[in-house]
Image: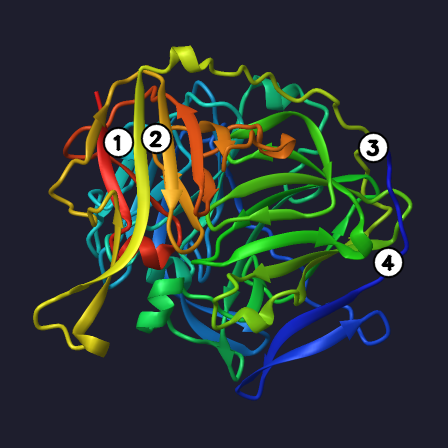
Amino acid sequence: MTLKNSALLLGALVSISLLGTTYIVNSNKASYSPSTNKLMIPELIDTKQNRATELVIQEGRHEFFSGVPSETKGVNGDYLGPTIKLYQGKSTQVTFTNDLNEATTIHGHGLHVDGRWDGGPQNVIMPGKSITYSYEIIQQAGTSWYHPHLMGKTAEQVHAGVAGFIIIEDDNSDSLDVPSRYGVDDIPIVVQDRSFVNGVMRNYSVSMEQIMEGLKEETLVVNGQISPYYDVPSGWIRLRLLNGSNARYHSYTLENGDSFWKIATDGGFLESPVEMTSLVMAPGERNEILVNMVNTASNRVLVEFLEDEQSLLSFFKNDHQVALELRVDDSIEPHLTVADVLNVIEDIDRNQVSVERNFVLEMGEVEVEGLVSSHNHHSMFSINGRSMDMNTINHSSKKGQYELWRISGQEMRHPFHMHGTSFLIVSQNGAPPNEADRGWKDTVDVNEGITEVVLKFDVTASKEYPFMYHCHILEHEDAGMMGQFTVE
């Protein structure tokens, strides 16, 4: 890869909140004030040393703005949770204890584990109770995450802060020439949007309009902080990006249009690094990128909140906020080279497909007796005309059998996520995927056209603990845009 360095310029908009009002402040090179908030790196729980670990889901008080606490929830802490590192071919016991005053679940988003350990809405953990999952890791190295999946409460609990990274390693990742020192040149970044009044995060509350669009707020939050900085070595830096927003799509760039290199999608490494200048991520997606910090003192990661043209918040479009400033510290040993070949991804021949399925994500309105709302109607979210029913299994898949899924949406974009496996994109709106998306994924952006993906399941899911497929706009998921299926 060619090293690319350029002068640092910023003509972006940074959203901050002061004195009870949210302001959009012009932040160019002349007026930009360097951050004094050092990025908080989640604690790493490396299961190579300990095959059993305990995590506590708890109430918290977190300071997004110094000296101003907000009521939050977290895992082993006040907001967000530790990073769990798992290993291919190894088994790990993870116990989740619920210290909240309400029920919850913990879903391993991206994990290929039996439905019993998937953490879907059937895996309820009541207040004061614990559940132990046995993670048998069969998949390749990649970046996954965990979050609640309680029916009707997912959006609220994720918004409060219950989420964390899962990193999987294998023999390939252990031997690859890529940055891999956690918290040094391998940095986990969860990006969310929140609203603040007097520096206090607004509690979760949604109107009917916000349910229709998904909750979209104004201020960029990175690892629970506002516009932080981090000291990094003068070499290649690996950022594990997670769009942890309830509903917002993000566009990532470096200031002044600098290039970066994408090396991994949701489920693992690409075959080779792909040079890019912008990256769009849907809610729930993960991507890994490399930033070159050779011969530069600093660089900033910018995020634009993307909006549908019809959105009531479309006036925020093209407003960039500073997600993270990378500052070079020459005392840290740099990683100066990167492998040209990262992975081998074999195409799945269409002739290998045994079953084809169609999924249509729909939004409509139906009358609900006794509901008091505008026009006495209630928004209905469904897949294939059916809203989520915990007592209904929508289909059954066969373990080891290749399937082709065709997914389409109506009226707006939907990030479609499935549990229990990863897939390869075959086509989107009739065109093959671009080079940067030709990797294993579990979440895909679906617009009004048709997206085709090919997959198979290597683990089982029973009627008692089925897998889910759903829109990952969390308000849509909670409102019924979800189905469930078994793997036998």
Using a 10 Å C-alpha cutoff, classify the residue at mark 3 as few (fewer than 14 neighbours), some (14 to 19) or many (20 or more).
some
Image height check: is 18 above or below 176? below
Element class at badge 3: loop
Using a 10 Å C-alpha cutoff, classify the residue at mark 1 as few (fewer than 14 neighbours), some (14 to 19) or many (20 or more).
many
Q: CA distance from mark 2 to mark 4?
A: 43 Å
Using a 10 Å C-alpha cutoff, classify the residue at mark 4 as few (fewer than 14 neighbours), some (14 to 19) or many (20 or more).
some
CB atoms at circles 2 and 1 under 8 Å apart? Answer: yes
Q: CA distance from mark 3 to mark 2?
A: 36 Å
Left or right of 19, for residue 4? right
Looking at the picture, tell me which residue is in the foreground, 475 or 162: 475
Lower position in the chain sequence, tag 3 or tag 4 = 4
- Residue 182 pos. (x, y %): 63, 40
Element class at badge 1: helix
Query: Which residue corresponds to mark 3?
Result: 336
Which of pointers 1 and 3 indicates the residue nearer the eye? 1
Q: Amino acid at mark 1?
A: Gly
- Residue 223 pos. (x, y %): 56, 57
- Residue 370 pos. (x, y %): 8, 73
Which of pointers 3 and 2 indicates the residue nearer the eye? 2
Q: Amino acid at mark 3?
A: Leu
Query: Which residue corresponds to mark 4?
Result: 8
Query: Which residue corresponds to mark 1?
Result: 115
Q: Amino acid at mark 2?
A: Gly
Element class at badge 4: loop
Lower position in the chain sequence, tag 2 or tag 1 = 1
User: Does any portion of residue 395 appear in the rendered image?
Assistant: yes
Q: Quadrant of the C terminus?
A: top left
Q: CA distance from mark 2 to mark 1?
A: 7 Å
Residue drawn at (47%, 73%) of the image: 312
Q: Amino acid at mark 4?
A: Leu
Query: Which residue corresponds to mark 2?
Result: 420
